[in-house]
Image (cartoon, rainbow, N blue to C red):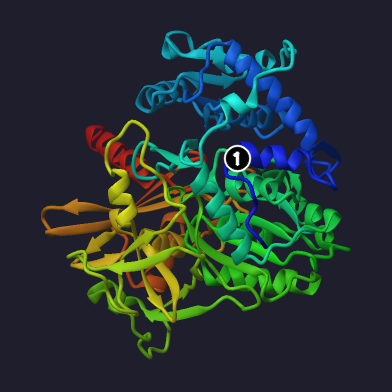
Amino acid sequence: MIRPPARTLQEALLAAASATPLRSVILLGSDLQPRPLGHDELLALARQSAAALLDAGMRPGDRLFLVLPTGPDFLAAFFGSLLAGIVPCPFSPPQGSQSPALFLERLAQLTRTLGIRGVVASPELLDPAGQELEGVLALTPDRLRAPLQGSGPDLAELAPAPDDVAFLQLTSGSTSLPKGVMVTHRAVLENLWQIAHASEMSAGDVMVSWLPLFHDMGLVAGLLLPLAYGLELCLSTPFAFLRRPAHWLHAIHRYRGTHSPAPVFAYRQLADRATDRDLAGIDLGSWRVAFIGAEPVHADVLERCDRRFGPHGLAATALVPCYGMAEATLAVTVKPMGERYRLRPVSRSLLARESRIAAPAATGGGGDELVLVSSGRPVQGMRVAILGEDGAELPSGRLGEIAIQGPSLFSGYAGLSDPDPEEIARGYRTGDLGFLEGGELFITGRRKELIILSGENHHPAEIEWAAAGNTAGAGNNGRAPRIAAFGIEDAALGTEKLCILAELDRRSETEEETPAAAIRRRVREQTGLVVSHVELVSPGTIPVTTSGKVRRARAKEIFLEMQSAARAGG
């Protein structure tokens, strides 16, 4: 795949709208009925929105929150912002039973922190905002649909430069308040080319995505990548997937999707909940690139997908683990095409005690074995290094902090001076832990979330995975109950103790074993660790980020609040 001639996303949209043959965004409802939106129509909607935004008082360089679900309104507002030189920042609308008051408080806090000038959202959300958003332009989608006066804005006058900020991408905020990652036009177009090159994309390919557009994987891979390369895009919603995961497979089958991205949990849901009836007549032979990322990739999910969907045409090489982050625009590493994913068994105990990568001990029960999944090789132009505690680069096979350097890195955080562009250019320290082996990257966890038990480092994701057992599909609305693991400092012991906050799974309760006992047993059997305390809460209690990751810091606060309340109650 050659690089697109566009230097900015504005140019990419203009090129897509004038291409022959003209492609489209096919908006899919839960019934898979298509609503085609040609790239020329998308440009017309974007022009209309650009004119309305400028008429409302927004100016080039201003920052704009888009609090909208996937659909024509989001597309018009996002690309209209780009045409007008305004910097859009997608923001997740309120989810499920989320408190409207807390949502508005968070929105207002981020508005001040990021220097947001305007917000586009539904009247139902904006009307109660009142003083929370005082001084901010509050715009509804209806306002952006106002008929153009004359020929609309002069796009040549508003054309951004390649090094101007194209959009703000919020980080997941799993350990703190989300940050606004500033992504330039040059960086995003570079990363789009890197992804296209790594995934061997060609002109006739079709992208299928249901991922939310306020998440980097959904926005960059699911929307901007097919637009920049003039591909057909079948765009659905997260709600369609959550109601019926097989909806995703039916879209790939019907529209002959070749590329489709999703986090690990989605593949787990798909393997667990897709019934034989769902899969009847399904042909997945067109699906060459099934991107898997956004959270630690587990070998058993890949193997279950192989077994479940291989008979329906999914090639053994189609599952593509990758690693990325908003600070790199999106992709950092991608599994090589044409190869099966690579697994690496390591000793869990040596990794915990000595941060050493070694073969697992030969024990009968296999409890010392931890199977890691390769996240692939760095994309073209990206350098990945592993750093020790002193910041020095470590050789292959040594565990340390992952640092990255390349042309698609962000230019800083909105409203913050740290890190500065020169520091980023020298190399960005991700805070993630991993090692390189054979040129491929293996992720083991996040430094900030390590649980230290008697001097041994343990990663919460592995403990949570063990605690969950085979619970996928149980719980609220068919969703697997959420589990958060963390360490609590114990002054008497002089170390941390392992604690777990878990959403109650009634399915796991038996006469012999309660849910809490089952969690303790699974963690002990699979990791050898002893859980000091389990707190059970109702489904939906444990908070998650917009991308579905458990917010462990907040979960820990909830746990401590429950403990405090129990002590106060005697």
User: Residue at coordinates 23% horizontally, 62% vertically from top-left?
Assistant: 452
213 or 362: which is nearer to us? 213
Q: Is residue 522 left or right of residue 268?
A: left
Q: Is residue 196 left or right of residue 547?
A: right
Q: Where is residue 378 in the image (x, y as percent from the top left)?
A: 47, 67
Q: Where is residue 161 in the image (x, y as percent from the top left)?
A: 51, 36
Q: Position of residue 30 (x, y in %)?
A: 79, 41
The C terminus: image quadrant? top left
Residue matched to label 1: 9
Q: Is residue 257 left or right of residue 96?
A: right
Dividing the picture into quadrants, the one containing residue 435 is bottom left
User: Residue at coordinates 59% horizontally, 17% vertically from top-left?
Assistant: 53
Whether 346 is drawn above or below 559: the answer is below
480 or 112: which is nearer to us? 112
The N terminus: image quadrant? bottom right
141 or 455: which is nearer to us? 141
User: Residue at coordinates 75% horizontally, 32% vertically from top-left?
Assistant: 42
Q: In this view, does 81 lie to the left or right of 100?
A: right
User: Residue at coordinates 61% horizontally, 78% vertically from top-left?
Assistant: 340
